[in-house]
Amino acid sequence: MLHDEGIVKVSGEVGSGKTMLCRMLMERLPAEVATIYLATPSFAREEILQAIADDLELKLSERRTVALRELQEHLITLYGAGRRVVILIDEAHVMPEDTLEQVRLLSNLESSRHKLLQIVLFGQPELDATLAKPSLRQLRDRITHSFRMRPLPTAEVVKYLDFRMRAAGYRGPQVFAPRAGRMLANASGGLTRRINILADKALLAAYSETSHAVTNRHVKAAIADSEFAASSRPRTLRPALLIALAAALGLAAGAGIQWLLNEPQAPVVPVQAAAPKPMPPMLRPAANSEELETELDLQEEADAITAADAESQPPQPLMTPNQRRRLQAYATGGQKLLSERIAATRNLLDRAPDESYAIELFITENPEPARMERFLIRARDMVPLSDVYLIPMGAGSQRMRVIYGSFESAKDAQEAERRLPPKYQQAFRTAPRSFAELRKQM
């Protein structure tokens, strides 16, 4: 940005985060850089010069050629004092061609060896089409770097949601269930503005139900309340295609029943998103009917923001090597849900502060993998499975402690304890436990 790079162009769809990136750039530039932000660039050719001069507190002549020379002399003075000037033009796709030509002339302002202005254009894809015109080929040739902000893929949307929650100060377990995150990614199209709107409404829906986790039901309510999501819903399948789909589903159901009859011992285990760092599958094409939407799920910068914080170091693991080995020594017997929750537990114990709390549900003397897998299958109908963790205890892992959630204080854990399903409150002797205690007793 400060290395005589000429004109830089950043394009992207509405809501992809261009303005956010522009404002972050203004905050991150060093103090010796004077930034000029033009938010309404639909200026006439003469007006853009005056807008720049106003930001620089400079009085220009009314004659354009004289005004350009005066501006150049002022920029040379600033450069000699160690100052640089960067012009950030937002919504550049609405600029008239004459004004864009003036931008080209501004890019020519330079000293004997250095450019005096760095210009960055932010605009929608229409900017690319405008710059492709033969009349603007000279400006196009001066663009040294061109970037395209594309929608976030599903995996990045889930990470983005989690990052925004952490940035807001939340320190508990993941709020957005993996399947809910995928549904939100599908409805938003990966555009950060839509992600923010849907996530806010889904959180409000979860709050109204006093639910700690945002589920696919809450996301569906948010989608129904958002015009952009409703308008992008696909049309209903044609009757002939629906009949064919119903027949295919019937055949699949028949095959599934036959398999169940032949294999009564094998429980059907739905695939859950892998923890500790959920990596949902890439965004699938939008469903074409309510039936396909139900099949999809019924069911957390993004790069720009995470790149801004790239200098921060990752937190050091809190478990000791012996504790980590003890956790890894527990054999899950290939049980899918059990393997995922053990991995999630390892991640939680490595990052949860000593002063934070979880709710102990029970301690079992028989942590046999198949038995624990059956418990998890039942548990997912009662509580969000992403909040259930299992901690092997003692040498050889003869005992297993089952805990729920992660909370900043004992008071928060006690309040969550009162919201547990009545069946759990009756069956288990629940109690808050600090993570310092949990790690110590492994």
Image (tube, helix red, strand yellow):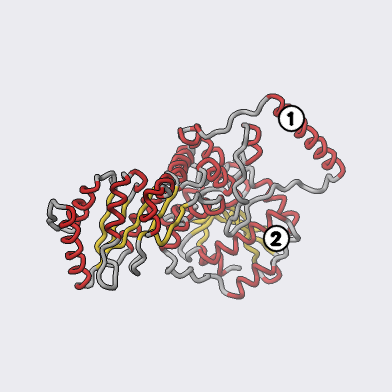
Q: CA distance from mark 2 to mark 1?
A: 47 Å
Position of 400 compared to 171: left or right? right
Name the one closer to the observer, 92 or 431.
Answer: 92
What is the x, y in percent for residue 441? 58, 68
Give amino acid for label 2. Answer: Glu
What is the x, y in percent for residue 427? 63, 47
Does residue 406 appear in the picture of this structure? yes
Position of 372 compared to 140: left or right? right
Numbered circle sitting on residue 75: none
Name the one closer to the observer, 346 or 22.
Answer: 22
Name the one closer to the observer, 144 or 419.
Answer: 144
In the rendered picture of this protein, how many numbered marks are placed on residues? 2
Label 1 element class: helix
Numbered circle sitting on residue 246: 1
**Residue at 44% from the left image edge and 54% from the top image edge:** 170
Of circles 2 and 1, which is in front?
A: 1
Give amino acid for label 1. Answer: Ala
Numbered circle sitting on residue 365: 2
Callout 2 environment at 10 Å: few (<14), some (14 to 19), or many (20+)? few
User: Residue 369's quadrant in the figure?
Assistant: bottom right
**Residue at 20% from the left image edge and 63% from the top image edge:** 72
**Residue at 80% from the left image edge and 40% from the top image edge:** 256
